Amino acid sequence: MNPAPDRVPSSSRTRAPAPPRLPLAAAQYSVPGAVRATPHSQSVWFAGPGAVELRSEPLPDVAPDEVLVRAVVSALSQGTELLVYRGQVPSTLELDLPTLRGSFGFPIKYGYASVGRVVQTGDEVRDLQAGDLVFVHHPHQTEYVVPAGMPVRLPPELDPEVGVFTANVETAVNVLLDANPRLGERVVVFGQGVVGLLLTQLARRAGAGLVVAVDPLDARRTLSRQVGADVALAPGDDLVEAIRELTDGVGADLVLEASGSSAALQSAIDCVAFQGTVVVCSWYGTKSATLELGGAFHRRRLRIVSSQVSTIDPALQPRWTPTRRLALARDLLPTLQLRSLVTQRVPFPRAAEAYDLVDRHPEQSVQVVLTY
């Protein structure tokens, strides 16, 4: 079964019995009016591979076109962020968000899923006000000042823990824009982490006739069935044959690879149908992938597509813009099964324990969040 949401114990190696999960209402996180900020904030930095530090940094004055946000909850990514934490990203790669600091060569302040309340607005800001619940592509930090155009205002009644999935849902939307699934197609999703579970849900919304989820962890396969997969399979020698049996011997029309595993990517190629498409949305970082691109791949005229959320398929522009895509992701939040994906809540001062958990015990978690 899916691990019960819990607070991480003092040692991530020993898990205390999970208390019953209580519903978390948005009102629990409210900021009464424009509360004056402390002169400094704390943020999570990676000082080196596997080394987490909490650093204090001064808060700048709020400019006329800026807002001050106080964090409520932020989400750890077990994909990209974990690669950065491990040092498995090319050190020369440029940072792709203006809120990030440092470099991939360490030290680095990284993260991109923060939900908070607006505390103060600049004199020229009209679209936000104190108390608004917002999502920001920002690292894990107690308070921060950003341009007023950066926060995404969320519905006031939305559970902040649901709001932290905004970036993940946007990524999943982008994958489906790249994949272009057709009505009734048979879709296989490799990897049932957060993005994979979102793809499992959204593939059905996009018209898939059959959705098959693949993951080595039994708890995640159970969760994938709960959120909409018709079948959930474990990887293995008989996987390709099982998928062919489910598709009348034809193979999958479309395969979405969200695992970051080269073995899964090979299986994706092996199980897709003639002239089928494999969309790779995992970031492999510095990991290499050895693939067999001989007879099966070559003769079946397969397509392998790279999907990355920083850009939108040029064929969809200018109709689709990042603003439109993000708005769709926000609107989808209350309609998706997201609360069940949060498996652990860790107080911000114990962030190092959270990273240790997702790094060393991925089988124990799906989405870990930091609370403030």
Image (cartoon, rainbow, N blue to C red):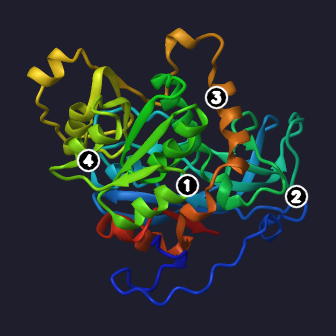
Is 278 placed above or below 132 here? above
Name the residue: 44% across, 70% down: 354
Between disc 3 and disc 2, whose residue precedes? 2
Q: Nearer the viewer, residue 57 or 94?
A: 94
Alpha carbon distance from label 4 to label 3: 29 Å
Residue 227 disc label: 1
Between disc 3 and disc 1, whose residue precedes? 1
Residue 280 falls in image quadrant: top left
**Relative image position of residue 287 (x, y in whole percent):** 20, 42
Q: The residue tagged with tag 4: helix, strand or loop?
A: loop
Task: Quickly name the residue at label 3.
Answer: 325
Horizontal arrangement in the rendering, residue 221 relative to residue 182 (left or right):
left
Q: Residues within 10 Å of mark 1 (few under 14, many from 20)?
A: some
Task: Quickly name the residue at label 4.
Answer: 88
Alpha carbon distance from label 4 to label 2: 41 Å
**Relative image position of residue 11 (x, y in whole percent):** 38, 84
Tag 2: amino acid: Ala
Viewer can see residue 98: no
> Are the residues tagged 2 and 1 within 8 Å (C-beta)?
no
Between disc 4 and disc 1, whose residue precedes? 4
**Relative image position of residue 348 (x, y in whole percent):** 56, 70
Q: Look at discs 4 and 1 and give the one toward the viewer.
A: 1
Alpha carbon distance from label 3 to label 2: 31 Å
Alpha carbon distance from label 3 to label 1: 22 Å
Q: Look at discs 4 and 3 and give the one toward the viewer.
A: 3
